[in-house]
Image (cartoon, helix red, strand yellow):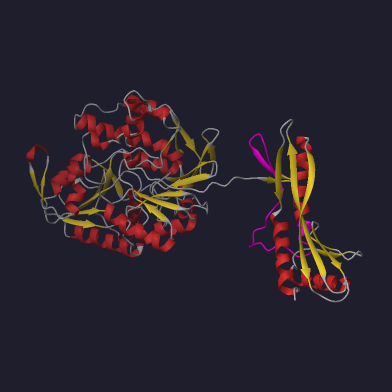
């Protein structure tokens, strides 16, 4: 599930440690994994994919949605360029490796059930977050789990909200980026954002907004575009060159993945073709006067956004707005935590004097959204990933308290053992069903009370069937013998035997309403076909005989094996009757 890189590291720690899976160097990942699933195109979810498939070695299928498959290679190539060509790093994947890796990918549609092999099947659900993001359900036999990747439970200006059905998985693995946050209203946040941008450019300052090329960028562009139009502002807004064009191309191509509003307006105009937002050139960094710049990447760890930040940071008139989460170790994370002096490469010290603002336009679910998803899909266990340990602890106790289910937050390399119940399906034959139903008499069965069935369990191939014991014996060529269990109760009661039999009949009718009871002309009483009551004796004492059937099977040649079984139901009725007769009739 996902194969990302860590933005905070530039050494081996940036990629996953696959030795947890392979254990020894000569083992291949393909021997251990049936498939890889990528939920969306953000680098912390797909950045290590070529490294895994081409450098470590994985030849199995890699599943992702159509938009993810289209956008992934572009972002991977962009990441490779920054790392290899600008930073000069070696031992990194090449452009050719990205191409080879993408050949192993298989595109999936939402709600389409994909059979990976005879046992394993996967299904994608809409996750919001970014274009093409999906949550995946994985099922093997009766056991299933849902892995959310990143998701957003509230719709925004360009994407719908995440959705999943009541699939009741054994395990839900959910992101927990905002495990302790409950976000304020979106409208307030948007108003606040526009106010801050406007007041900064009005004073002649420059605003830097670090974003990832696809996702929040489009959301905030739509917001500023409509505000600039409404307020008739002339201050230039720029967006990193190249990627804007590609991004908008993909939004047009995958319009069905966007929100309802965008789909509707698309007929008249494309909301991603901006009038006020122009492509950015690196030469503009030195331009005087106010401007707003959207630059990639989003956490200020490299690329254009970091370059612009270094130039603008010493000026207190300027402003940086961080619209999303920053991973520990990145420049974005440092300045959000109040760092005023940063040590850059070549031991240079950068004075941070510009105004630093954090406004969560992040497309992750907040604590309320995570709880909502859990109540929607009703998992039996929850596992938290993609978050900070302390915040996870808070959410874990909240989940356990509210839903009464187990919640796990394993560290890297830790094994979590999750117990699941395994049901064994058994087909019941129609004649047996009819026979059991006839025993109920005219009363409908109580759906809340379990019923005990009496039948023979037969295994044919891999199927289990419950059939009539007579039929099972016939199929096996065995002879059937009937045994009856009989017990006699002595009563010191005067009068005729028929009077005692009448009393017993009334007693049985009153106390065993759910069973068919019949009274024969010879004075015997039969209950549910197999339990028999007979009264005999003289004027002074009576003996009441209660009998019910056992079933015996004899099989074998020289040595015989005898199987004795009886219906619990008959035994329950019989023993209940004996108790009843002793309590009610014995004087």
Q: Looking at the picture, does residue 439 appear above or below residue 541? A: above
Residue range (magenta): 437-465
Q: Furthest residue to the top?
A: 26
Residue 87 seen in this snapshot = yes
Dividing the picture into quadrants, the one containing residue 93 is top left
Magenta stretch encompasses residue 124: no
Predominant SS along the magenta part? loop
- Would residue 371 appear left or right of 429 to someone viewing this image? left
Q: Is residue 227 left or right of residue 89?
A: right
Picture coordinates of residue 4 (x, y %)?
33, 39
Position of residue 577 relative to residue 89, above or below, is: below
Above or below: residue 514 compared with residue 124: below
Of 119 and 338, the residue lying toward us: 119
Q: Is residue 454 magenta?
A: yes
Q: For the C terminus, which image quadrant?
A: bottom right
Q: Position of residue 537 (x, y in %)?
A: 86, 68
Which residue is pictured at 43% across the width and 57% down the height? 405
Q: Can see residue 368?
A: no
**Which residue sits at x=19%, y=32%?**
87
Q: Residue at x 44, y 61 (%)?
A: 403
Q: Which of the two residues, 69 or 191, is positioned nearer the viewer here? A: 69
Q: Is residue 131 left or right of residue 340?
A: right
Which image quarter is the N terminus in? top left
Q: Which image quadrant for residue 141? A: top right
* Numbered marks: total: 0
Q: Give residue 454's position: percent from left, percent from top.
A: 71, 51
Residue 372, horizontal then vertical, whole percent: 43, 59
Residue 185 left/right relative to 573? left
**Residue occupying image coordinates x 41% and y 28%:** 30
């Amino acid at each position: 599930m996902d194969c990302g890189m860590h933005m905070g590291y530039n050494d081996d720690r940036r990629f996953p440690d696959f030795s947890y899976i392979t254990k020894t160097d000569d083992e291949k990942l393909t021997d251990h994994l049936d498939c890889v699933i990528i939920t969306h195109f953000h680098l912390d979810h797909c950045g290590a994919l070529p490294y895994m498939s081409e450098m470590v070695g994985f030849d199995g299928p890699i599943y992702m949605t159509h938009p993810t498959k289209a956008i992934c290679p572009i972002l991977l190539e962009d990441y490779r360029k920054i790392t290899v060509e600008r930073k000069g790093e070696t031992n990194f994947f090449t452009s050719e490796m990205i191409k080879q890796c993408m050949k192993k990918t298989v595109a999936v549609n939402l709600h389409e059930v994909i059979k990976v092999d005879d046992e394993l099947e996967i299904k994608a659900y809409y996750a919001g977050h970014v274009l093409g993001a999906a949550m995946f359900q994985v099922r093997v036999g009766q056991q299933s789990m849902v892995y959310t990747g990143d998701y957003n439970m509230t719709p925004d200006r360009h994407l719908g909200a995440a959705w999943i059905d009541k699939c009741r998985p054994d395990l839900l693995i959910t992101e927990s980026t905002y495990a302790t946050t409950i976000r304020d209203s979106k409208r307030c946040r948007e108003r606040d954002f526009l106010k801050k941008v406007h007041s900064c450019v009005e004073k002649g300052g420059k605003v830097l907004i670090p974003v990832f090329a696809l996702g929040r960028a489009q959301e905030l562009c739509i917001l500023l575009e409509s505000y600039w139009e409404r307020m008739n502002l002339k201050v230039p807004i720029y967006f990193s060159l190249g990627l804007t064009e590609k991004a908008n191309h993909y939004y047009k191509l995958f319009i069905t993945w966007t929100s309802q509003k965008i789909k509707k307006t698309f007929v008249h105009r494309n909301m991603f073709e901006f009038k006020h937002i122009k492509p950015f050139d690196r030469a503009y960094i030195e331009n005087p006067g106010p401007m707003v710049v959207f630059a990639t990447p989003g956490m200020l760890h490299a690329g254009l956004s970091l370059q612009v930040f270094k130039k603008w940071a010493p000026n207190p008139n300027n402003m940086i707005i961080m619209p999303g989460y920053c991973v520990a170790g990145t420049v974005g994370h440092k300045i959000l935590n109040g760092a005023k002096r940063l040590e850059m490469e070549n031991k240079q010290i950068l004075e941070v004097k510009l105004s630093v603002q954090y406004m969560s336009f992040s497309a992750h679910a907040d604590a309320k959204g995570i709880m909502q998803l859990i109540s929607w899909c009703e998992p039996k266990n929850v596992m938290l990933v993609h978050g900070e340990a302390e915040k996870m602890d808070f959410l874990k106790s909240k989940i356990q308290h509210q839903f009464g289910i187990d919640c796990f937050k394993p560290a890297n390399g830790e094994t979590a053992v999750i117990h699941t119940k395994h049901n064994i399906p058994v087909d019941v034959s129609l004649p047996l069903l009819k026979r059991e139903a006839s025993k109920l008499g005219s009363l409908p069965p109580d759906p809340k009370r379990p019923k005990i069935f009496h039948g023979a369990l037969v295994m044919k191939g891999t199927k289990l069937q419950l059939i009539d014991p007579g039929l099972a014996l016939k199929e096996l060529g065995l002879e059937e013998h009937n045994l009856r269990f009989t017990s006699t109760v002595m009563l010191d009661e005067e009068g005729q035997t028929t009077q005692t039999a009448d009393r017993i009949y009334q007693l049985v009718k009153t106390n065993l309403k759910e069973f068919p009871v019949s009274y024969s002309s010879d004075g015997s009483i039969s209950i549910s076909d197999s339990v028999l009551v007979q009264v005999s004796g003289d004027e002074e004492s009576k003996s009441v005989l209660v009998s019910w059937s056992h079933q015996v099977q004899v099989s074998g040649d020289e040595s015989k094996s005898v199987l004795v079984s009886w219906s619990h139901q008959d035994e329950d009725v019989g023993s209940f009757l004996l108790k009843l007769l002793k309590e009610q009739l014995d004087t």
